[in-house]
Amino acid sequence: MYMGEETSLEERENWVTLFKSLADGHRLQIIQHLLLGEHRVTDLVEHVGLAQSTVSTHVASLRKSGLLASHTHGRATYYTLAYPEETKALLTAAKAFFDGTEKLRQTSQPESTSHD
């Protein structure tokens, strides 16, 4: 989706699913750990400090959005970022956006004046 470009309902729904999956601090924390490499749910539980059922729910949401891929080795399922470079680029763009808007906020705030 780009400025001025029409998108289909399906495309917009995909964007909504993606951004909803990123709109949770724990899911972002999971993504950050997966940027380091593949992990099992039990590894992620240890990293984020949540119950296994909660982490599994977050992983399912991230899979639904297309951010995660998985493979099975023996009885263990390992999760990875489906598109690690694109995910890094998306997070970098979000950081640049927030850094830029923070600078804009700081420069647009009126100077405080003290009245003695």
Image (cartoon, grey):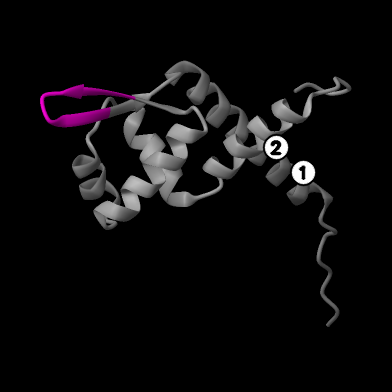
Magenta-colored segment: predominant secondary structure? strand
- Rendered position, 44 above or below 74: below
Tell which of 64 and 30 is nearer to you: 64
Helix, strand or loop at label 2? It is helix
Side of 67 where 7 appears, left or right:
right
Q: Of the numbered discs in the image, which one, if any, rests on residue 17? A: none
**Mark 2 → mark 1, Cα distance in angstroms:** 6 Å
Assess disc 1: are there few (<14), some (14-19) or many (≥20) residues with their C-alpha within 10 Å of its C-alpha: few
Q: Which residues are drawn in magenta?
A: 70-78
Magenta run includes residue 89: no
Tell which of 68 and 84 is nearer to you: 68
Please identify the quarter of the rendering in which residue 13 is found.
top right
Q: Dots 2 and 1: beta carbons under 8 Å?
A: yes
Question: Label 1: which residue?
Answer: 104
Amino acid type for the residue under numbered disc 2: Gly
Which of the image's four quarters has the C terminus? bottom right
The residue at 42%/21% (across/down) is 82
Question: Label 2: which residue?
Answer: 100
Tell which of 9 and 21 is nearer to you: 9
The residue at 47%/50% (across/down) is 25
